Image (cartoon, rainbow, N blue to C red):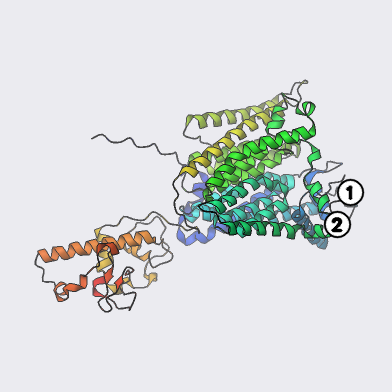
């Protein structure tokens, strides 16, 4: 007989990767409580080590970089009234972030003044670079990230991945938290991007659990911390609108969303509304006069400007309109998919695709803005199983994103941290492999060869005098091409997920390992074992057995009454009881045909009475004649009588 050709399985991550080896002892259920402390400790130590590096603008007058900007905002917010925050000395790092950043700066500055007031003295503290000040500022970044971003990522991994073991979920949570790009920008270059990203992840978690008000509030918090969270806004709006329209129009839900969103904005902007400074705040938050892009960023405008001089051909207003049109075209596909198929599995892909559209084509983009499309893409590492195709693409785009920021990191003196973090992250997770299709292999090989070639050329060859920025432009062009490929890959993945049949998912994450097959011996154990044997305490069994232990009938039964064991699902319990009924019928038929003289069989021939097959094979109680389905422990649900039929 001709056998059908089996589909070639996707390659899996090798079980010999260092990350798998590190987490293999944690697969034992008795040490699950160690997973989170280990993750927190490892991420903390690595962030502290990176924090020893120089920061942006270290001993680099006159402006001193982003570190001085953040310190100066703490100085301004702790010394001046709110009505002056967005007006004070705009030539020296004027405040240009939304109110929640200002409140955060005030809180950090207030604590810093209690420790050492000279750090934030008005005017006299400008350009201060004391070591203790650096330690305090680094500590504020750590505290902010561990209060917002780290718990949000941990919660996301638990609800997004419900099939892997807790150790496997912890492994991928660690890889998300060790994302090199975010660590290098926040803990080396110095910024607070993790707070905005953390609020966004919390909003995703709430939307995953259909908590639309909480999700709306936290996403507005992300917008009010950094305006770049607008990169996610079209995707979030399309998803929420889709949930209000499909499968039927829910006007009440739409009104609730609108009220929650506007109320949250009003609360955050209330002090500036009352003082009449909202207009100045918005003018500072959206600085359209700055230009189309800053520095050398790997987006369309900066890349194409090498061949088409946009700033000479178009006015600033015309460029704004062109970038708006290009951005709308880029974000339209993910928004349409999210609106027509408002499924929570599409949220990470949709947010990433929308943010890529903004990063590649929008107005006023900085190279650090790549963190926005990168965050939801990196969250895809939490997917269940060893889908190496998906995870190799995620690892690849993270590597390219860090490479795209090389000129910024080199200027800050972060070459060592750049190299070590990239190699450590790829080595731990085993991202050195390639996808299984030839297109993916070609793209990855060409990209990695280009990155290596750029670094070698920059190290050993001087750029031509005619083109002093040739290596930087090569970096921008290569990174832009890779980002476009990943944006298209994200759209393709969204379409594949959207076209899959809808499967009812659990709202809460829980470990549900593959269930064992049910054979005659298992049925015999359930139906014929002595009740006293079944009711013996759970402590009589070994409760720290790993999840990979053999599924003997004893272990299988104890999993249904011992919380430390993996429980049977409701479907599997019903299937088990149905097979128990089949076994009873066959045993009774066999006993009747062979002329058995079993006293228990002949004493009460009606005790095996069943309802018709449509009842699912429920058993009849001897005392109250009620039909029971949940008879695993041998007692009737209605009257509590222990029936002999259940033995």
Residue 133 image offset from top left, x and y in percent: 80, 53
Foreground label between 2 and 1? 2
Local packing at callout 2 (Cα closer than 10 Å; few below 14, some 14-19, many 20+) is some
Cα–Cα span, label 2 and label 1? 13 Å
Please tell me which residue lies in front, 124 or 24: 124
Viewport quadrant of the C terminus: bottom left
Which percent across, then down, holds residue 481?
62, 30
- Give the left or right position of residue 477, taking residue 445 as reference: right
Which residue is tagged 2? Answer: 83
Q: Position of residue 527 (x, y in %)?
A: 26, 67
Q: Quadrant of residue 427?
A: top right
Q: Secondary structure at mark 2?
A: helix
- What quarter of the picture does the N terminus occupy? top left
Residue 444 badge? none
Is 574 situated left or right of 179 in this image? left
| Residue on which disc 1 sits | 89
Residue at 49%, 54% in the rendered image = 167
Is residue 178 among what the camera can see?
Answer: no
Nearer to me, 134 or 203 = 203
**Frontmost residue, 454 versus 383:** 383
Residue lying at the far left in this picture: please name it.
595
Q: Tag 1's secondary structure?
A: loop
Q: Which residue appears at 62% of the width and 42% of the height?
A: 354
């Amino acid at each position: 007989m001709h056998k059908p050709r089996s589909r070639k399985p996707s390659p899996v991550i090798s079980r010999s990767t260092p990350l798998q080896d590190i987490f293999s002892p944690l697969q034992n259920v008795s040490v699950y409580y160690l997973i989170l402390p280990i993750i927190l400790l490892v991420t903390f130590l690595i962030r502290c080590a990176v924090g020893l590096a120089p920061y942006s603008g270290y001993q680099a007058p006159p402006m001193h970089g982003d570190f001085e900007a953040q310190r100066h905002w703490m100085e301004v917010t702790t010394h001046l009234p709110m009505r002056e925050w967005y007006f004070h000395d705009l030539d020296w790092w004027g405040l240009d972030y939304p109110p929640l950043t200002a409140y955060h700066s005030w809180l950090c500055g207030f604590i810093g003044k209690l420790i050492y007031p000279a750090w934030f003295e008005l005017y006299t503290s400008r350009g201060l670079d004391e070591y203790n000040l650096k330690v305090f500022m680094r500590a504020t970044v750590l505290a902010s990230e561990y209060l917002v971003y780290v718990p949000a990522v941990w919660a996301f991994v638990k609800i997004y991945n419900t099939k892997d073991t807790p150790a496997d979920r912890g492994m991928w949570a660690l890889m998300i938290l060790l994302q090199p790009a975010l660590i290098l920008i926040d803990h080396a270059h110095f910024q607070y991007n993790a707070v905005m990203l953390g609020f966004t992840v919390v909003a995703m978690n709430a939307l995953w659990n259909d908590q639309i008000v909480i999700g709306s509030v936290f996403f507005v918090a992300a917008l009010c911390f950094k305006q770049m969270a607008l990169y996610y806004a079209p995707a979030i709006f399309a998803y929420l609108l889709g949930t209000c329209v499909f499968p039927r129009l829910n006007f009440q839900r739409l009104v609730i969303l609108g009220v929650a969103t506007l109320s949250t904005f009003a609360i955050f902007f209330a002090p500036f509304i009352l003082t009449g400074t909202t207009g100045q705040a918005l003018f500072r938050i959206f600085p359209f006069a700055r230009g189309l892009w800053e520095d050398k960023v790997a987006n369309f405008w900066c890349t194409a400007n090498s061949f088409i001089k946009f700033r000479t051909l178009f006015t600033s207003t015309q460029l704004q309109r062109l970038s708006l049109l290009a951005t709308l075209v880029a974000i339209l596909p993910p928004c349409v998919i999210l609106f027509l198929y408002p499924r929570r599995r599409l949220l990470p892909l949709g947010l990433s695709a929308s943010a890529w559209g903004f990063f590649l084509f929008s107005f006023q983009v900085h190279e650090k803005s790549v963190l926005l499309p990168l965050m939801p893409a990196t969250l895809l590492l939490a997917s269940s199983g060893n889908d190496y195709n998906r995870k190799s693409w995620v690892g690849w785009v993270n590597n390219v994103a860090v490479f795209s920021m090389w000129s910024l990191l080199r200027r800050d003196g972060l070459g060592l941290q750049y190299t070590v973090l990239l190699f450590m992250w790829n080595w731990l997770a085993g991202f050195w492999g390639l996808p299984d299709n030839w297109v993916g292999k070609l793209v990855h090989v060409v990209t990695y060869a280009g990155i290596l070639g750029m670094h070698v050329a920059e190290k050993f060859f001087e750029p031509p005098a005619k083109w002093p920025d040739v290596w930087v432009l090569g970096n921008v062009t290569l990174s832009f091409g890779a980002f476009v490929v990943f944006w298209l890959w994200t759209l393709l993945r969204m379409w594949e997920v959207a076209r899959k049949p809808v499967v009812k998912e659990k709202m809460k994450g829980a470990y549900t390992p593959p269930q064992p097959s049910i054979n005659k011996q298992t049925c015999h154990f359930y139906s014929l074992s002595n009740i006293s044997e079944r009711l013996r305490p759970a402590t009589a069994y070994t409760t720290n057995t790993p999840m990979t232990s053999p599924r003997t009938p004893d272990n299988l039964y104890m999993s249904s009454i011992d919380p430390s064991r993996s429980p049977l699902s409701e479907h599997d319990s019903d299937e088990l009881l149905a097979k128990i009924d089949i076994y009873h019928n066959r045993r009774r038929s066999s006993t009747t045909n062979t002329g058995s003289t079993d006293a228990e069989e002949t004493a009460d021939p009606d005790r095996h009475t069943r309802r018709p097959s449509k009842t699912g094979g429920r058993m009849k109680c001897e005392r109250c004649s009620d039909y029971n389905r949940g008879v695993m422990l041998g007692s009737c649900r209605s009257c509590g009588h222990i029936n002999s039929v259940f033995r």
